[in-house]
Amino acid sequence: MSPSLGTIIIYARDMQKTAAFYSKHFGFETSGQVVEGLIELQASHGGASILIHQAAKSVKLGQVGVKLSFHVSDVVAFSAASAKNGLKFGAVHEANGYSFANAKDADKNSISISSRAFRKHSASKA
């Protein structure tokens, strides 16, 4: 059950402006639409996707504005296995057909595990 780095979450004050920046300068494809509180950007030639998330007023951007999110099919199982190896994730959250949990790395940087990439989509992604 090896996770892959599939998503980089960027916290932004102006979500649209940040999405436009990565689309214009790095070729990420996006509708620019906020869905489930996120703007999703896909790498046009493969690689990790980006999710733009609204930054809370308390977030000091430039210091804690990025989170690495690892794709795992079973968040609960991965969290339990990680705990045995000394990495404790917080509560597992359920959201729109997928689950996720958060933790910190050794330097207190935010990381997460998420089954979002494995969820079953209904007829439309709207």
Image: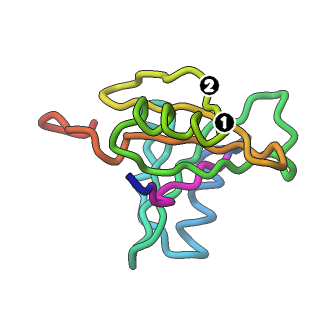
User: Viewed as shown, does residue 91 lie left or right of 13?
Assistant: left
Residue 19: give x, y in percent of width and height. 57, 55
In the image shown, does 41 or 77 lie closer to the viewer? 77
User: Secondary structure beneath disc 2?
Assistant: loop
User: The magenta stretch spans which residues?
Assistant: 3-10
Q: Main secondary structure of the magenta part?
A: strand
Question: What residue did someone put label 2 on?
Answer: 90
User: Viewed as shown, does residue 25 lie left or right of 93?
Assistant: right
7 inside magenta stretch: yes
Residue 49: give x, y in percent of width and height. 47, 60
At 34% from the left edge and 26% from the top edge, which residue is drawn? 96
Residue 37: give x, y in percent of width and height. 50, 32
State the CA–CA distance, disc 2 to disc 1. Answer: 6 Å
Question: What residue did someone put label 1 on?
Answer: 103
Identity of the residue furthest to the bottom in this view: 45
79 inside magenta stretch: no
Which comes before the other along the chain, label 2 or label 1?
2
Q: Quadrant of residue 11?
A: top right
Question: Relative to 2, is 120 above or below?
Answer: above
Tags 2 and 1 touching, CB below 8 Å: yes
Q: Residues within 10 Å of mark 1 (few under 14, many from 20)?
A: some
At 16% from the left edge and 34% from the top edge, which residue is drawn? 122
Label drawn at residue 72: none
In the image shown, does 35 or 43 lie closer to the viewer? 43
User: Viewed as shown, does residue 113 lie left or right of 25?
Assistant: left
Q: Amino acid at mark 2?
A: Gly
User: Secondary structure beneath disc 1?
Assistant: strand
Q: Amino acid at mark 1?
A: Ala
At 59% from the left edge and 34% from the top edge, which residue is drawn? 83
The quadrant of the image that shows the C terminus is top left
Q: Residues within 10 Å of mark 2 (few under 14, many from 20)?
A: few
